[in-house]
Image (spheres, rainbow, N blue to C red):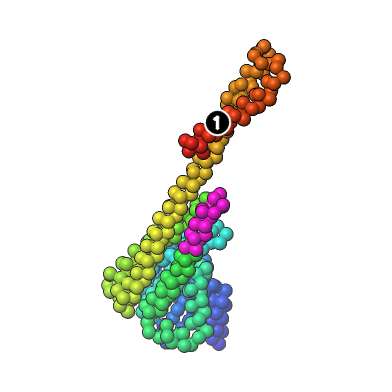
């Protein structure tokens, strides 16, 4: 009786522990998908108790500075990948890490929960039996590819948003919003740099799997086909980002040129005004001295001085116009 009570108590404790953890599991046939959102140390301890994962790999799941990589062990394949997430408050693309453990009959995904494709896909498989049959009925590696394919496709809407922002900046530059355009160009440059920093090492991982994926025993489907497709998408993203970078640099140069041109226009007008006023100021300063000068006592002096000033201004404007200085 005591043994039975202890067994029941142990089962209840395990059930309560799993409910308190941010871990969800889908079982279909022989395959299990363990999804861990926003992991902490308790979730890593759970994985350490139920799987034969290396402690350093579990630490990598919690690391914020881990580079994308792939490691093979006798019992599983471990991958760390980064995917872009746009931060609306900071207006910059930030990396979101996904750690993956792949075995013959299990797939474990560890992420922060801010990647909508993997969150929505897990909910779809959990609620829909047809989805479980389609995506989990083949193998763990096919389920892995499906997840990665959705995550890579998720990169394109963010990329398209950058393209739309570039078009808006173009309108600002050639409009009357130059000051705003300068700030937008700086934000776009930072966004593209962050995006390229995320996608470049990711592409290297997919290219490695494309060329050497057949060496990994846990990748059942043809790696050169599936991961080659992912690598092509990542290379396309890289090429597009490179094009965006060149366009933004061109916008920066154009904006600097237009700003310099407008400054030169203002300086030219001010220089013309200063040049016209210089002789008049000189004459006025001379006759403003407290010394006797010719013509000061004549009642016609002031009207003649005004007429002379008008004539001098007109003559100088004529000369400047003829020389195309204005």
Examine the rendered structure and indicate whether residue 124 appears above or below residue 269: below
Instruction: Determine the residue located farthest toward the right in the rendered image.
Output: 299
Q: Position of residue 280 (x, y in %)?
A: 60, 25
Residue placed under numbered mark 1 in the picture: 315
Q: Residue at x 39, y 59 (%)?
A: 242
Number of other residues with Cα within 10 Å of mark 1, as a class: few under 14, some 14 to 19, many 20 or more? few
Examine the rendered structure and indicate whether residue 30 appears above or below residue 245: below
In the displayed structure image, the side of residue 172 where residue 75 appears, left or right: left
Q: Position of residue 271 (x, y in %)?
A: 54, 33
**Magenta stretch prevailing secondary structure:** helix
Region of the chain picked out in magenta, as a range: 163-181
Residue 180 seen from this side: no
Q: Position of residue 5 (x, y in %)?
A: 56, 84
Q: Is residue 174 magenta?
A: yes
Q: Residue at x 45, y 85 (%)?
A: 132
Instruction: Pick the residue in front: 62 or 184.
Output: 184
Instruction: Pick the residue in front: 232 or 107.
Output: 232
Instruction: Pick the residue in front: 279 or 76.
Output: 279
């Amino acid at each position: 009786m005591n043994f039975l009570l202890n067994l029941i108590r142990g089962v209840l404790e395990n059930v309560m522990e799993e409910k308190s953890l941010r871990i969800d599991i889908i079982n279909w046939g022989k395959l299990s998908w363990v999804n861990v959102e926003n992991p902490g140390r308790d979730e890593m301890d759970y994985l350490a108790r139920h799987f034969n994962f290396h402690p350093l790999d579990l630490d990598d799941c919690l690391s914020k500075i881990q580079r994308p990589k792939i490691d093979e062990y006798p019992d599983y394949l471990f991958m760390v990948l980064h995917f872009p997430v746009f931060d609306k408050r900071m207006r910059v693309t930030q990396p979101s890490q996904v750690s993956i453990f792949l075995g013959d009959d299990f797939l474990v995904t560890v992420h922060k929960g801010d990647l909508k494709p993997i969150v929505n896909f897990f909910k779809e498989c959990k609620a829909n039996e047809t989805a479980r049959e389609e995506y989990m009925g083949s193998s763990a590696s096919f389920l892995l590819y499906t997840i990665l394919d959705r995550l890579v496709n998720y990169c394109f809407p963010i990329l398209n948003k950058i393209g739309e922002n570039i078009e808006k900046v173009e309108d600002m530059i050639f409009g009357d919003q130059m000051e705003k355009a300068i700030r937008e160009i700086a934000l776009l440059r930072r966004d593209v740099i962050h995006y390229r920093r995320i996608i470049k090492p990711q592409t290297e991982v997919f290219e490695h799997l494309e060329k050497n994926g057949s060496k990994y025993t846990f990748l059942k489907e043809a790696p050169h086909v599936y991961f080659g497709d992912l690598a092509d998408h990542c290379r396309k993203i890289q090429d597009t980002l490179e094009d965006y970078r060149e366009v933004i640099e061109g916008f920066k140069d154009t904006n600097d040129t237009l700003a310099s041109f407008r400054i030169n226009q203002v300086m030219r007008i001010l220089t013309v005004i200063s040049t016209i006023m210089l002789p008049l100021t000189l004459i006025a300063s001379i006759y403003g001295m407290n010394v006797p000068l010719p013509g000061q006592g004549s009642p016609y002096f002031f009207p003649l001085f005004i007429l002379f000033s008008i004539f001098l201004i007109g003559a100088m404007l004529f000369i400047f116009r003829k020389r195309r200085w204005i």
